[in-house]
Amino acid sequence: MNVDKIRTNVVFKGSIIDSHMHIGQWSKNGNSNNIMNFDSNAIDEFIKSPLSIQVQGNTQQDEVEKVIISNLDGLVLNGKDEISANKALLEMCDKNSKFHALAVCQPSVTDGNSVQINNLIQENPEKFVGLKFHPRHFGAQADSDTYRPYMFVAERYKLPCVFHSDIQFNNDGKPVDKISSPEAIHNIARLHPDVPVVMAHMGAGDVKSHQNAIEELLKSIDEKDSKLYVDVSWVDWGKDGLSSIEKPSIVKLIKELQKRNAVDRILFGTDAPLGCFGENPAGGLSPKRAYEKTVSDLKTVIKENFKDQADDLINKIFYQNAEDLFFNKHWTAQKEAKVPKTPLIKIIGIVTAVLAFIGIGGIVIDKVSSSRDTSLTK
């Protein structure tokens, strides 16, 4: 028996959850005269048939088992309002069991009034797996008070929050702005430590931008002040518009998280069908081939840099971390496990203290939340 020949013909299968996908209308290259409409077919491109993945000379037939989607129509100014955008998304998700909805939110448009989004989630139990924010497109910095009522909604329904993140630096090393910066996102996450917050694109931009996001992520873990995550869409990208086989930022991130036993904070995502995945085909590759290259490159880099630990890391980054965050919600169980049993006499004392505080400082609480979101008292 030729064992080597048998081994080379082995076909492996990997499971993938893409934590960052879209449907809806989009202005190609920011040109309002060039509108693209991505419907469910744009996503089916990647999920209807297995992916052909190449890792260290081996061919794998991977499958995208779940995709987490937000509606582009609700993520841009002058698009759909947050309710109609989310209802349209739910209709699409109802037709495909692999589709899972992120509720797009528009705090700067509603001036922080989260009543409608709260009611929509309440009327559609378990149909949304999280909330989505895009500070860059709406102009309100990620740590402004307008986001807080929405964060209270996320806390109420145990939903993670995904923030578009990006940061650019001037020649003097100072940030151009902090609208979607990792720092601002970390700030809002600190105020709501029980809500997992994902920094999509890990700061976007270049290596310096990614490093800034890594620093904020590690700071949050070291200081234990929030539940920050990152997705790696557009991280370590090539100038040709395709995934690069060189991924120094992701390798550094994994190594730092391994030291902290926190590899669960990394999510795979692509931002498809934007960029090379449908908006701007690159390098002569179809959207599906560009997607396959993205998966192949990252898995190859992990295999080459982490050897015996690679298979476990691949499973976590491509599947299990997203499964635990958005679906199993292990983070809620961890919180409950930390709550000690409190004697009745102590409970009475705590309640008394809280009532006294409300009598003195209730107006402060009301200013931040109640006046903008009366639904939270329902």
Image (cartoon, rainbow, N blue to C red):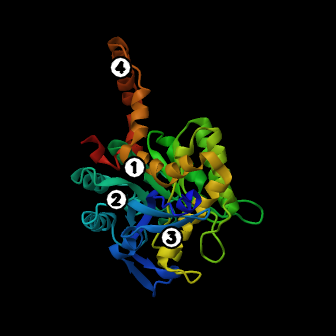
Query: Disc 2 vs disc 1: Cβ atoms closer than 8 Å?
Result: yes
The residue depicted at 69 percent of the width and 61 percent of the height is 207
Which residue is identified by label 2?
Answer: 100
Residue 150 left/right relative to 255: left
**Location of residue 333 (image quadrant):** top left
Q: Identify the residue position indicated by label 4 in the image.
A: 352
Tag 2 near tag 4, CB within 8 Å: no
Of marks 3 and 1, which one's residue comes earlier in the chain?
3
- Circle count: 4
Mark in front: 3 vs 1: 3
Q: Earlier in the sequence, mark 4 or mark 3?
A: 3
Q: Position of residue 216 (x, y in %)?
A: 62, 48
Dot 2 or dot 4: first in sequence order is: 2
CA gap, disc 4 to disc 3?
A: 57 Å
Nearer to us: label 2 or label 4: 2
Q: Which mark is residue 76?
A: none
Residue type highlighted by circle 1: Phe
Please tell me which residue is depicted at 48% across the width and 61% down the height of the picture: 11
Local crowd at mark 2 within 10 Å, few (<14), some, or many (≥20)?
A: many
Label 1 SS: helix
**Which residue does the numbered mark 3 point to in the structure image?**
291
The residue located at (46%, 42%) in the rendering is 192
From what the image shows, is residue 296 above or below residue 239?
above
Tag nearer the camera, 4 or 1: 1
Farthest left residue? 123
> Of the residues shown, which amino acid type is indicated by label 3?
Tyr
Distance, label 2 to label 3, CA atoms, is: 19 Å
Kindly state the secondary structure of the residue where label 4 is placed: helix
Give the structural element (helix, strand or loop) at label 3.
Answer: helix
Distance (Cα) linking label 2 and label 4: 43 Å
